[in-house]
Image (cartoon, rainbow, N blue to C red):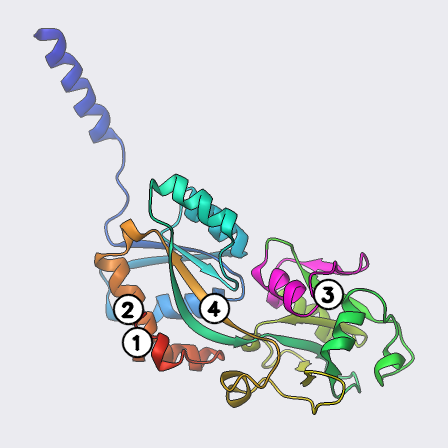
């Protein structure tokens, strides 16, 4: 009996010495595209709910899914849908249910050029040729006689994967493409390089010295700008939903309240203020 009591007391001491996660802390990790929006959401929400602490970090959608699987984040931000193998890994880690997917905003994935670049529009076919390395000079798409400099995202980025799938039709990027650690870095590089071209979220371009170029769905159609009307009307050809994924076991209490707020009127107003596009009404509470 004395030995059992000693073991129980030792376990109690170890448990007491192990720090518990801070109450009211929500961790968010993943998409760099979503970082500025997620940070603004957190700032506004914490201002209304000072008892809740929200920690936001980026790293890319793939990094977020890995953290979700490893249970080192509560929420995973993603600029692409979760893959089957990521679902399987999460199911194994969670011990049953797959992650719950929430659409949280809409993005017109923009193509960035330097403000000094005279090119006024590009087609999806031309973008394919440029980023796969078939088109190497701006004169071939109506610009100056200058070599094209490609700026891309790292392969853990959901934006990289979305662009590769939907614009390059699964083909590899040209080996000359310079990999940048985030959307902001892509824009900074393009703004300083009159021959540069890059891509990323619509909310980043304002005040950078770069411009968004209108895109033609096909060579015979008019170019379309990534405006709210064109993106929500699905006229702009490179649009996507932005997502948050969560372990269903955690989707309750403060986390559920925060997710509901994000998809409600106040959270969607933040979406508009940051520069993305508000979620259509039918998706706000699903």
Q: Quadrant of residue 45?
A: bottom left
Q: Is residue 60 left or right of residue 24?
A: right
Q: Which mark is residue 242?
A: 4
Q: Nearer the viewer, mark 3 or mark 4?
A: 4
Q: Position of residue 126 (x, y in %)?
A: 78, 77
As helix, strand or loop, the secondary structure at mark 4 comes to strand
Position of 5 relative to 220 (above/below): above
According to the picture, the residue beneath numbered tag 3 turns out to be 151
Q: Residue furthest bottom?
A: 222
**CB atoms at circles 1 and 2 under 8 Å apart?**
yes
Q: Dot 1 lies on which element?
A: loop
Disc 3 versus disc 1: distance between alpha carbons? 35 Å
Residue 180: say if magenta: yes
**The N terminus, quarter of image:** top left
Mark 2 — residue? 260
Residue that carries the numbered disc 1 in the rendered image:
264
Quadrant of the rendered structure where residue 282 is? Answer: bottom left
Q: Is residue 134 left or right of residue 102?
A: right
């Amino acid at each position: 009996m004395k030995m059992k009591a000693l073991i129980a007391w030792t376990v109690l001491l170890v448990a007491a010495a192990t720090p518990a996660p801070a109450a009211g802390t929500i961790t968010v990790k993943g998409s760099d595209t979503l970082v500025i929006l997620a940070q603004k959401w957190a700032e506004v929400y914490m201002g209304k709910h000072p008892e809740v602490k929200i920690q936001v970090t980026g790293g890319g959608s793939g990094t977020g899914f890995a953290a979700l699987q490893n249970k080192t984040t509560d929420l995973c931000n993603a600029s692409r849908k979760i893959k089957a193998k990521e679902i399987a890994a999460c199911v194994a880690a969670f011990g049953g249910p797959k992650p719950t997917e929430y659409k949280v905003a809409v993005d017109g994935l923009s193509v960035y050029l330097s403000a000094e670049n005279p090119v006024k529009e590009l087609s999806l076919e031309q973008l394919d040729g440029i980023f796969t390395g078939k088109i190497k000079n701006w004169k071939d798409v109506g610009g100056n006689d200058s070599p094209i400099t490609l700026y891309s995202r790292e392969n853990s980025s959901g934006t990289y994967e979305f662009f590769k799938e939907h614009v390059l039709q699964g083909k590899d990027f040209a080996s000359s493409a310079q990999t940048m650690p985030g959307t902001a870095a892509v824009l900074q590089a393009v703004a300083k390089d009159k021959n540069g071209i890059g891509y990323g979220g619509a909310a980043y371009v304002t005040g950078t010295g770069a411009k968004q170029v209108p895109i033609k769905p096909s060579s015979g159609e008019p170019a379309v700008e990534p405006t709210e009307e064109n993106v929500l009307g699905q006229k702009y050809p490179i649009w996507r939903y932005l997502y948050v994924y969560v372990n269903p076991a955690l989707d309750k209490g403060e986390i559920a309240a925060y997710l509901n707020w994000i998809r409600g009127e106040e959270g969607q107003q933040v979406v508009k203020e940051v520069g993305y596009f508000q979620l259509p009404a039918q998706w706000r509470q699903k």
